[in-house]
Amino acid sequence: MEKIIGVVGGVGPLAGLDLQQKIISQTVAGRDQDHLTVLSVSRPCAIPDRTEYLLGQVAENPATALAEQVQLLAQMRAQVVGIPCNTAHAPPIWDVLRAELARANCQIYLLHMIEEVGRFLGKHHPEIERVGILSTTGTYRAEVYPQVLAGLGFTAVTPTLLMQETLIHPAIYHPQHGIKSCGRVTERARQDLLAGVTALQAQGAQAIVLGCTEIPLALTEKQMDDTLLIDPTLILARALVREADGGKLRPYSTS
């Protein structure tokens, strides 16, 4: 029996819409009625910025608001939920979120996007050894991806701290050209992220995880030169379809 998908859609709003579009694209359907049921809650005003929390710039843990919105989805009868925010999966946030859901006896199945990325790489690209990471500075400092990937036998490579703070993070957050700030992908943001790709390629990255859900909006290519670009939002979408009704999951394709 099909399960209802829930999406915490405001982290950020563009990422929530991107996840829903990718759920549709990864579903085998010949007509409207064949698509899966997806419930989305997009209330970004209630959720403190995840990176600002991890960097000590705000005191309130976003986990509390995230738990409230997951519980709201559960009340709406969602059974499997995804949060399209890489930074929210940092242990200081994620562990508190899971604890609050447990205290509330919320039985919903909450997918872990970073772990899904690790499983995806192991299943579809076992030949890869070095994986580059582009992310927010919160995810960068929390080492969310390196910890998960190391446990699966991958070596994670990241930009220098200087590049992280002057190019990669501003491509997402800068008030004049950041994707979150502008609500769209600016040419400056794309060029700065491309510089990050080049730097990681120079470190031997065979694949690069676009580890902030705004980055795949700017880097839509599946491959650059011989380097695969890995979209966690797409992987989360596929995992949600798999858990909701595995028979409707499109076969994976690199084309």
Image (tube, rainbow, N blue to C red):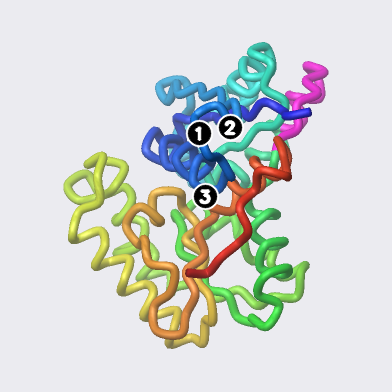
Q: Nearer the viewer, residue 104 or 141?
A: 104
Mark 3, mark 2: which one is toward the viewer? 2
* Secondary structure beneath label 1: loop
Going from N to C along the chain, the mark reached first, 3 or 2, is: 2
Residue named by callout 3 = 233
Asked if labels 3 and 1 touch by Cβ distance under 8 angstroms, the answer is no
Where residue 203 appears, x then y in whole percent? 48, 86
Type of amino acid at the residue the image marks with label 3 = Thr
Residue named by callout 2 = 34
Image side of residue 173 versus residue 150, left or right: left
Type of amino acid at the residue the image marks with label 2 = Asp
Where residue 233 appears, x then y in whole percent? 52, 49
Type of amino acid at the residue the image marks with label 1 = Arg
Asked if labels 2 and 1 touch by Cβ distance under 8 angstroms, the answer is yes
Asked if labels 2 and 3 touch by Cβ distance under 8 angstroms, the answer is no
Which residues make up the magenta segment?
Answer: 98-110
Q: Quadrant of residue 232?
A: bottom right
Q: Residues within 10 Å of mark 1 (few under 14, many from 20)?
A: few
Residue 61 visible? The answer is no
**The magenta stretch spans residue 185:** no
